[in-house]
Image (cartoon, rainbow, N blue to C red):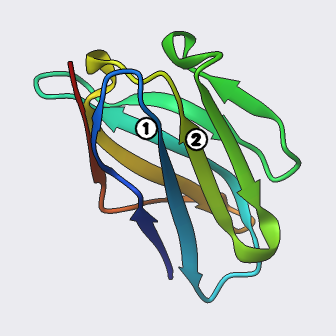
């Protein structure tokens, strides 16, 4: 069983920065792809950024150049550095990760990010 524990959300003014962290815990050897999704009120959950175990990254178009995803494989932790935040980034951010030979998916509990204008 894998648990994903998120931290780092909060309230920030427009133009500010936040860093989200997500640590995978449990009986794991290593995580496969890990990433961040977000869900704003009344909207569907969307992929924000994803990173493979080998460091290949993928970003949603609106966050390119502002957000950076990274990971520490030794700690099975993924980070999301968010800069130049704007009100449209306000959402609950969910950590997502895949584990094992069958690439089973797991979700964190979500962390609220609120950007005030």
In this view, the residue in front, 38 or 20, is: 20
In this view, the residue in front, 22 or 26, is: 22
Is residue 39 rendered to the left or right of residue 55? left
Helix, strand or loop at mark 2:
strand
Front: mark 1 or 2? 2
Residue that carries the numbered disc 1 in the rendered image = 37
Per the rendering, the mark at residue 92 is none
Residue 37, percent from left and from top: 43, 38
Task: Name the residue: 69% across, 70% down.
Answer: 76
Task: Name the residue: 42% across, 64% down.
Answer: 6
| Quarter of the view holding residue 49 | top right
In this view, the residue in front, 111 or 116, is: 116
Is residue 50 rendered to the left or right of residue 11? right
Q: Looking at the picture, does residue 95 appear above or below residue 55?
A: below
Q: Residues within 10 Å of mark 2 (few under 14, many from 20)?
A: some
Q: CB of mark 1 within 8 Å of CB of mark 2?
A: no
Q: Residues within 10 Å of mark 1 (few under 14, many from 20)?
A: some
Residue 10, percent from left and from top: 28, 50
Residue that carries the numbered disc 2 in the rendered image = 81
Quarter of the figure that contains the C terminus: top left
């Amino acid at each position: 069983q894998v648990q994903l524990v998120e931290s780092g959300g909060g309230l920030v003014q427009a133009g500010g920065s936040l860093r989200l962290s997500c640590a995978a815990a449990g009986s794991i050897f290593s995580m496969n792809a890990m990433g961040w999704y977000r869900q704003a009120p009344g909207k569907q959950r969307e992929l924000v950024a994803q990173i493979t175990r080998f460091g290949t990254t993928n970003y949603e178009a609106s966050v390119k150049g502002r957000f950076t995803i990274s990971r520490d494989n030794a700690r099975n932790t993924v980070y999301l550095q968010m800069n130049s935040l704007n009100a449209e980034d306000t959402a609950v951010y969910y950590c997502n990760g895949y584990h094992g030979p069958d690439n089973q998916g797991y979700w964190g509990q979500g962390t609220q990010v609120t950007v005030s204008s």
